[in-house]
């Protein structure tokens, strides 16, 4: 009489291994927290955008003896949205695109998750970022929509 000696895994062993793998995957996902990682990536993008805008402003100032020159007028003293002025008395915008685009930047960067932010042309855009110049002449660009309770601002 032949007795087959079959080697393999039982159904119970397979279920236990699959349960352990599921638990480990759950722990890894909880530790990595993909939502936080995406928020950190968007904040890095915001910082890079602010640096790009500030470099354009610095180039403008370098060509104009240290003074930011723009047909739009002087930089605002309080944080003001960088967008074309829509004429609405309740909102305040500073139209910076004609001052920077084409000569210093190819287009204005915009906040990756701010509502309505985007770039179409010098006349149609919304950066989602703000700009101001204090009494000492320091220019600040900021990202008010920064995530994870961070304040992202760049001052020169």
Image: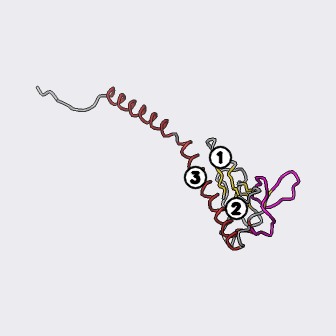
Assess whether mark 3 and mark 1 are in contact (beta carbons under 8 angstroms): no
User: What is the quadrant of the C terminus in the image?
Assistant: bottom right
Residues drawn in magenta: 68-92
Residue at horizontal 56 percent and vertical 47 percent from the top: 40
Residue 147: quadrant of the picture: top right
Q: Residue furthest left?
A: 1
- Dot label at residue 20: none
The alpha-carbon separation of the residues under discs 1 and 2 comes to: 23 Å
- In the rendered structure, find residue 151 and report the number of the disc placed on it: 1
Q: Farthest front residue?
A: 136
Q: How many marks?
A: 3
Where 51 sits versus 38, above or below?
below
* Secondary structure at numbered mark 1: loop
Q: Position of residue 62 (x, y in %)?
A: 67, 71
Locate residue 12, reporting x and y percent. 33, 26
Looking at the image, is 35 positioned above or below residue 155?
above
Q: Disc 1 and disc 3: Cα gap in Å?
A: 12 Å
Q: Which quarter of the picture shows residue 46?
A: bottom right
Q: Nearer the viewer, mark 1 or mark 2?
A: 1
Closer mark to the observer between disc 3 and disc 2: 3
At x 48%, y 40%, the residue is 32
User: Sequence order check: which comes first, mark 3 or mark 2?
Assistant: 3
* Mark toward the viewer: 1 or 3: 1
Q: Position of residue 106 (x, y in %)?
A: 65, 69
Report whether 22 appears left or right of 45. Answer: left
Task: Name the quarter where the N terminus is drawn.
Answer: top left
Q: Is residue 90 above or below residue 94?
A: above
Q: Secondary structure at mark 3?
A: helix
Q: Mark 3 — residue?
A: 44
Of 24 and 141, which appears nearest the observer? 141
For disc 2, the marked residue is 119
Q: Residues within 10 Å of mark 3 (few under 14, many from 20)?
A: some
């Amino acid at each position: 009489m032949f007795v087959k000696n079959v080697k393999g895994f039982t159904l119970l062993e397979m279920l236990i291994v699959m349960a352990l793998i599921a638990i480990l995957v759950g722990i890894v996902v909880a530790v990595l927290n993909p939502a936080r990682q995406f928020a950190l990536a968007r904040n890095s993008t915001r910082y890079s955008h602010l640096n790009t805008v500030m470099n354009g402003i610095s180039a403008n100032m370098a060509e104009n003896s240290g003074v930011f020159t723009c047909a739009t007028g002087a930089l605002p003293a309080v944080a003001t949205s960088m967008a074309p002025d829509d004429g609405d008395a309740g909102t305040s915008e500073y139209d910076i695109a004609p001052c920077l685009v084409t000569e210093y930047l190819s287009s204005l960067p915009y906040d990756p998750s701010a509502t309505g932010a985007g770039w179409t042309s010098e006349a149609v855009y919304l950066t989602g970022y703000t700009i101001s110049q204090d009494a000492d002449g320091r220019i600040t660009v900021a990202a008010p929509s920064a995530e994870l309770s961070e304040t992202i601002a760049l001052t020169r």
